[in-house]
Image: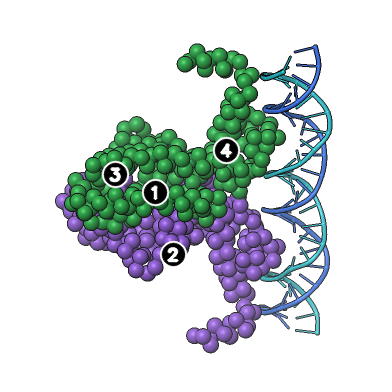
Chain colours: A green, B purple, C blue, D cyan
Amino acid sequence: MSGDAQISRLKPGRRTDIRRENERAILEAAEKVFAEAGFGGATMQLIADMAGLPKANLHYYFATKEDLYRRVVQQIFEIWLDAAASFDDAPGPVEGIGAYIDAKMDISRRHPHGSKVWASEVMHGAPVIQDYLETTLRDWTEGRIAVIQRWIDEGKMRPVNPRHLLYLLWATTQHYADFGHQIQTLNGGRPLSEAQWKEAKASVKDMVLRGIGAI
Amino acid sequence: MSGDAQISRLKPGRRTDIRRENERAILEAAEKVFAEAGFGGATMQLIADMAGLPKANLHYYFATKEDLYRRVVQQIFEIWLDAAASFDDAPGPVEGIGAYIDAKMDISRRHPHGSKVWASEVMHGAPVIQDYLETTLRDWTEGRIAVIQRWIDEGKMRPVNPRHLLYLLWATTQHYADFGHQIQTLNGGRPLSEAQWKEAKASVKDMVLRGIGAI
DNA sequence: CCACAACCTGACCATTCGGTCAACAAGAAA
DNA sequence: TTTCTTGTTGACCGAATGGTCAGGTTGTGG
């Protein structure tokens, strides 16, 4: 495994490898630049510099700035949906919502740029991913509301409004990415430590699960 | 009253009135444009059109785009701090935090643009209001943490981490402004009705106050 | 080796944007 | 009326940006 990786790094010739690696580097740089400067403030030149490629090369892989941006947003959306699987196959809210909070807090920690790009996109009226909101996200939301309602009917949690519970979950978990700079400033300018992240997750889970009467 | 307004509209002469009215119109337009397009995506021309003034006139009242943006952000920050007064003079968490949620939800409903500009500013690393975060916001936060800790010590609520409680409050209440478009899409494309806003406030208060063991 | 396709990139272009300025209009003070 | 300050605005400019393109280089299949 590491042998193959070594070879492919020493012999960067293979066409598919070149394309894959360059697209990866561009997307990684774009995610960071879009998150830090917004779509309007980001420049192709800056993304190119950060990816270590000439600007013209970006337009070889991604026709327009919008195309590149769309790919970044889609990439994030898929990560979100994957994490949403935590919700499924759970016998009750303690396991399901607990795991969902864990998963979303981990994403906020590991993909803060992506979360910001998503937030920015939605705040600006979702010009690029409106169809996703109306189809995939809506379907997912309705499905999860049904699951929560079932838990309520089964007496596993208090009768709260499932929709607003989801909003509270999204808001709180993503806050640690989107407002990470503010949190860091209020933490004496230092990023949250491992222990502090653990404490954050525990606090959120504790308040939410008690708030819905699951514990 | 309407007579005075009529007169002042027919006689727009007074110097201070002209300046005040034009600055107000520009700030209102700027808040909307900055919220919808971000700082980088906003253009002085668009703000000017929305304010009904020639672009050159904007630069007469606000030297640079940054100056105008800074004024917009500061304006929002003051609204936030005013609402924070709800926290004070409360005998316990039910009244204090309950009133704070009410106030912040009302702001999210009435000043969605402002909330988005603030979110965007923080997400981009707070280049303009970093000093506010380090002084005013930090002091306010520490003060409120002390209040919450006192309530905990007095047995009026469970021993939760006050800092993460504040983050949960900020995140959840502001979510209804910052992600208003997403919420509207999930609401069949229609803005929340009066009854739905009432339900949202009640749901948030219920989940939070139970989550911290205040009710 | 050859020929074709994929990949690379410096130079260039049209457009847009923030900001300037000079000339002008309108109230206020005398 | 005269004078001075404040407010108004079309025209303009330098800089930056997204995007193009022609001419190259590199890998690959035959």
Q: Is mark 3 on a helix, strand or loop?
A: helix
Q: Do the residues labelled 2 and 4 touch (CB within 8 Å)?
A: no
> Which residue position holds label 1?
A140
Q: Which of marks 3 and 1 is nearer the N terminus?
A: 3
Q: Nearer the viewer, residue B140 or B211?
A: B211
Q: Quick check: do tags 1 and 2 share a chain? A: no
In the depicted structure, whether residue B162 falls above or below residue B178:
above
Q: Nearer the viewer, residue A68 or B41?
A: A68
> Which residue position holds label 4?
A30
Q: Where is residue A158 in the image (x, y as percent from the top left)?
A: 21, 54
Q: Do the residues labelled 2 and 3 touch (CB within 8 Å)?
A: no
Q: Quick check: do tags 3 and 1 share a chain? A: yes
Q: What element carries label 2?
A: loop
> Which of the 4 quarters of the picture holds residue B27?
bottom right
> Which residue position holds label 2?
B191
Q: Where is residue A136 in the image (x, y as percent from the top left)?
A: 45, 49
Q: Distance between the residues labelled 2 and 4?
A: 33 Å
What residue is shown at x 36% (from left), y 40% (from top)? A85
> Which residue position holds label 3?
A97
**Residue type of the residue flagged with mark 1:** Trp
**Residue type of the residue flagged with mark 4:** Ala
Q: Where is residue B171 in the image (x, y as percent from the top left)?
A: 38, 51
Task: Identify the subunit bearing mark 4.
Answer: A
Q: Quick check: do tags 4 and 3 share a chain? A: yes
Q: Which of marks 4 and 3 is nearer the N terminus?
A: 4
Dividing the image into 4 quarters, which one contains the C terminus of chain B? bottom left
Task: Identify the subunit bearing mark 2.
Answer: B
What residue is shown at x 56% (from left), y 68% (from top)? B24
